[in-house]
Image (cartoon, helix red, strand yellow):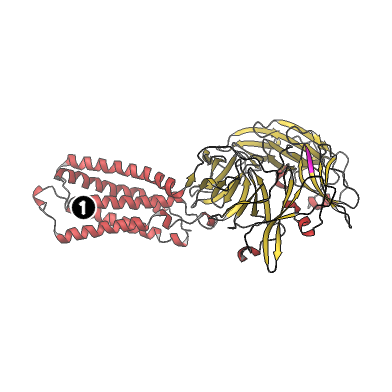
C-alpha cells in the first residue's frame, strides 16, 4: 500500500476517533441512571473505549512530524504487537457492548428505562472508536503532517464515514435485531366461522408470554407482551409476526368493533413527562405496517396532566374535556394534537350531569356512545354519590345516550328516558351475535336496547317468567341466545329468539351446575353452543369442551364432551384455573381454546376446534 493512501486512511481514522468522542460523550453523560442489572456495566465499557480513543489520538498527535526523514522504513515488532493488542481490545469492546447483551426485555416495561435507541447509540460510538483505532494503528507507524492535501482528504473522508455510520448503522440494527417483523405472503381467503365443532384440528404453543387472544380476519390474533402473532384459524399456521422484544412500556391491543387493524404503542426514548408514545398500526390480515408515528399527549388548556383517551381508532382518539363553554367530547388525531371534531353537550342551567365510569364514553367500530344522567343540582356539599343513592328520582331527571360518528363527531342518534334511580352506571354495553353469522351489534342501556348503527329500538330478549333465571349468551339486532334456568326440577332451556323477542327455537338440555356457572364463556355458533370448562380428574384439572346442537329438540339433550388431549394441566397453571379460566373465541376457521380471565401472561397452548 502506498504512502499516500496510508496517510489518507490514517487521518481519516483520526477524524473517526474525534467524531466518536464528540457524538458519544453527550449520550454517555445523559445515559439514564436507573438501568437494569444487566446494563450497569455498559457505561463502564463505553468509557473504556473512549479512553482508548483519547490515548490513541493523543499518541498520534505527539508522534506526528513534518520531516519525512523521521519515518522509519519498517515498524518494530514490539510496536506491531502493541498496536495489534489495542485494536483487538477495541473489537472485544464492540462485542461486549452489543445492544442485545444489555437491553432488558419488554416484560420489564415499568421497571427500567433503558431505551433501545440510547443503547444502540452507545454501541455505535464504540464501533467508531474501534474503526478509528484500526485505521490509525494498522496503516501507519507515524502520520505525516507535511502533506496537507492528504491530511484534509483523510479528515474529510473520516467525517463522512462518521456521518454514514452514525446514521445508517442504528437503522440497520433496529430493523434486524430490535424489531421482529414478518408479513403474510398474501391476504388470502379466510375460512368462515364454523357452524359446529367436533374435534381438535390444531395446537399452537406460544414461545413468549401471552396476554390476550383476539379475533382477526383470518384466525386468532395472539397478543404477546411485546407484540403480536397472527395464526390461520383453519390450520394453526403462523401468518405474520410483529414484536418489539426490547421496547419500553409496550402496550398492545385491537380497536373495538373491528378486526382489520391492531395497534402497538411504546415509548421510544427518554423524555420529560408527559411522555410521547409511538403508535404502530398493523394490518391484521397481512401484518404490514399501516401507520407508524408519534402520538403526542393531549393536554387540556390550563391542565398539567394529559386527558384520558376514552376511545381509540386508527386515526382518532376521543377525550372528554371541561372548558369555560361547557363539557365537550373531542376527537383528536392520533399523530398530532389537532382537533378533528368536537361535540358540545348541552347543560341546562341549574342542572347537574353525572357521567359514571370511564367518563360516560364507550366506542365500538364507527360509533362513540356518550351516556349521562342530568338532574336539578341537589346542592350536596360532600359525598354526592352516597347522597344520590338515597334520593328519590326528582322530576325532570333525564338519562340519555348519544351516538356520534367516530370519524366526524356528528350526532347519529339519541335516546332519552327517565331513570329508575340515581346510581352511577358503566357506559352503555355493546353486545354482538358472537360466533353466529347473522345480526348487527346493539347498544344495551338502562333505557332499552338499540341498534348501534342507527339507534333503532330492538327487543330481541324474551320476557323472563317468574322464578326463572335467564343468562344472555348472544344478542344482536336479529335475535338472541338465552340460557334459562326454570328452577326446581324443571329442565334447562336454551332459547333462540328473533328480532322481536319471539322464541323461534327451544332446546332442552341436561342440567349441569358446573357448566351453568361457566356459560358466560360459551361460544354461540350457527348450529351449536360450545362451552369451555375445567374437568376434574382425580387431583388434576383438565381443559375440555362441551357442545350442544341447536336443533330445537324437545327431548332433553346431553352435552357432548370434546377432550383436548393435553393430559394434566401443568402445576404452574393450577392457581388460575377457575370457572372463568378457560375461554373460547370463535374465529374464521375454528373456535379457539385458551386460558384467559387472569391478570398475568401465560405460556399454555392454544387449541383450534374445527368441524
Which SS does the magenta portion mostly show?
A: strand
* Residue 459: image location, x then y, percent: 83, 38
Circle 1: element type: helix
Give above or below for 139 relative to 477: below
Above or below: residue 602 compared with residue 550: below
Residue placed furthest toward the left: 69
Question: Residue 384 at what x, y percent from top left?
Answer: 79, 50
Count of marks overlaid on the render: 1
Q: Between residues 208 and 169, which one lies in front from this camera angle?
A: 208
Q: Mark 1 points at which residue?
A: 138
The extreme right residue here reads 466
Residue shown at 63%/63% (left/top)?
569
Q: In which quarter of the image is residue 560?
A: bottom right
For residue 407: magenta? no
Check residue 479 for magenta coloring. yes
Q: Which region of the structure is painted magenta?
A: 476-480
Please tell me which residue lies in front, 392 or 315: 315
Q: Can residue 154 be seen in this view?
A: yes
Q: Quadrant of residue 572?
A: bottom right
Q: Nearer the viewer, residue 332 or 211?
A: 211
Q: On the picture, is 467 further left or further right than 35?
A: right
Coordinates of residue 99 in the picture (x, y in percent): 41, 54
Please name the residue shown 22% across and 42% down the image. Answer: 154
The answer to which of 292 and 552 lies nearer the viewer is 552
Q: Can residue 344 be seen in this view?
A: no
Residue drawn at (20%, 43%) of the image? 8
Q: Which residue is drawn at 44% across and 59% down?
A: 39
The local crowd at label 1, few if under 14, some if 14 to 19, many if 20 or more residues have their Cα within 10 Å, is some
* Residue 274: image location, x then y, percent: 56, 47
* Left-right relation of 526 to 388: left
Amino acid at each position: 500500500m502506498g504512502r499516500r493512501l496510508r496517510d489518507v486512511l490514517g487521518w481519516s481514522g483520526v477524524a473517526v476517533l474525534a467524531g466518536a468522542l464528540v457524538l458519544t460523550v453527550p449520550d454517555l453523560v445523559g445515559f439514564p441512571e436507573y438501568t437494569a442489572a444487566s446494563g450497569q456495566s455498559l457505561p463502564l465499557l463505553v468509557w473504556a473505549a473512549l479512553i482508548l480513543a483519547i490515548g490513541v489520538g493523543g499518541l498520534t498527535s505527539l508522534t506526528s512530524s513534518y520531516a519525512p526523514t523521521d519515518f522509519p522504513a519498517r515498524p518494530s515488532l514490539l510496536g506491531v504487537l502493541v498496536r495489534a493488542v489495542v485494536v483487538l481490545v477495541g473489537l472485544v469492546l464492540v462485542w461486549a457492548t452489543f445492544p442485545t447483551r444489555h437491553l432488558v426485555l419488554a416484560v420489564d416495561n415499568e421497571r427500567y428505562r433503558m431505551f433501545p435507541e440510547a443503547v444502540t447509540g452507545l454501541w455505535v460510538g464504540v464501533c467508531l472508536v474501534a474503526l478509528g483505532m484500526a485505521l490509525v494503528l494498522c496503516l501507519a507507524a507515524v502520520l505525516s503532517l507535511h502533506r496537507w492535501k492528504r491530511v484534509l482528504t483523510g479528515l474529510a473522508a473520516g467525517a463522512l464515514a462518521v456521518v454514514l455510520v452514525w446514521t445508517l448503522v442504528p437503522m440497520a440494527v433496529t430493523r434486524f435485531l430490535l424489531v421482529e417483523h414478518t408479513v403474510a405472503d398474501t391476504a388470502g381467503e379466510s375460512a368462515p366461522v364454523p357452524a359446529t365443532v367436533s374435534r381438535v384440528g390444531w395446537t399452537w404453543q406460544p414461545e413468549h408470554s401471552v396476554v390476550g387472544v383476539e379475533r382477526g380476519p383470518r384466525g386468532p390474533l395472539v397478543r404477546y407482551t411485546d407484540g403480536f402473532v397472527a395464526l390461520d384459524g383453519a390450520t394453526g399456521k403462523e401468518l405474520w409476526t410483529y414484536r418489539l422484544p426490547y421496547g419500553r412500556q409496550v402496550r398492545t391491543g385491537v380497536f373495538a368493533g373491528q378486526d382489520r387493524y391492531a395497534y402497538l404503542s411504546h415509548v421510544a426514548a427518554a423524555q420529560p413527562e408527559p411522555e410521547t408514545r409511538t403508535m404502530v398500526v398493523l394490518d391484521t390480515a397481512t401484518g404490514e405496517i399501516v401507520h407508524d408515528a408519534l402520538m403526542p399527549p393531549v393536554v387540556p388548556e390550563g391542565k398539567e396532566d394529559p386527558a384520558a383517551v376514552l376511545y381509540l381508532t386508527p386515526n382518532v382518539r376521543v377525550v372528554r374535556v371541561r372548558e369555560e363553554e361547557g363539557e365537550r367530547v373531542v376527537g383528536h388525531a392520533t399523530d398530532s394534537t389537532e382537533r378533528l371534531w368536537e361535540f358540545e353537550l348541552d347543560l341546562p342551567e341549574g342542572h347537574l350531569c353525572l357521567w359514571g365510569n370511564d367518563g360516560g364514553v364507550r366506542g365500538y367500530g364507527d360509533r362513540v356512545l356518550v351516556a349521562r344522567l342530568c338532574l336539578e343540582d341537589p346542592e350536596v356539599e360532600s359525598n354526592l354519590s352516597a347522597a344520590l343513592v338515597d334520593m328519590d328520582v326528582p322530576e325532570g331527571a333525564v338519562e340519555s345516550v348519544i351516538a356520534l360518528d367516530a370519524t366526524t363527531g356528528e350526532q347519529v342518534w339519541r335516546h332519552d328516558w327517565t331513570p329508575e334511580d340515581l346510581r352511577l352506571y358503566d357506559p352503555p354495553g355493546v353486545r354482538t351475535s358472537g360466533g353466529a353469522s347473522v345480526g348487527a351489534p346493539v347498544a344495551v342501556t338502562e333505557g332499552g336496547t338499540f341498534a348501534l348503527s342507527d339507534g333503532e329500538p330492538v327487543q330481541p330478549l324474551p320476557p323472563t317468567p317468574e322464578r326463572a333465571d335467564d343468562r344472555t349468551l348472544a344478542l344482536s339486532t336479529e335475535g338472541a341466545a338465552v340460557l334459562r334456568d326454570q328452577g326446581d326440577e324443571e329442565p334447562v332451556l336454551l332459547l333462540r329468539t328473533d328480532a322481536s323477542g319471539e322464541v323461534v327455537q327451544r332446546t332442552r338440555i341436561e342440567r349441569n351446575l358446573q357448566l351453568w356457572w361457566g356459560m358466560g364463556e360459551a361460544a354461540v355458533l350457527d348450529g351449536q353452543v360450545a362451552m369451555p370448562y375445567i374437568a376434574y380428574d382425580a387431583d388434576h384439572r383438565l381443559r375440555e369442551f362441551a357442545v350442544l346442537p341447536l336443533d330445537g329438540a324437545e327431548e332433553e339433550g346431553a352435552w357432548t364432551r370434546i377432550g383436548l388431549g393435553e393430559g394434566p394441566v401443568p402445576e404452574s397453571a393450577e392457581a388460575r384455573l377457575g370457572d372463568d379460566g378457560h375461554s373460547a373465541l370463535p374465529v374464521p376457521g375454528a373456535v379457539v381454546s385458551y386460558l384467559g380471565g387472569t391478570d398475568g401472561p401465560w405460556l399454555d397452548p392454544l387449541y383450534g376446534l374445527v368441524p
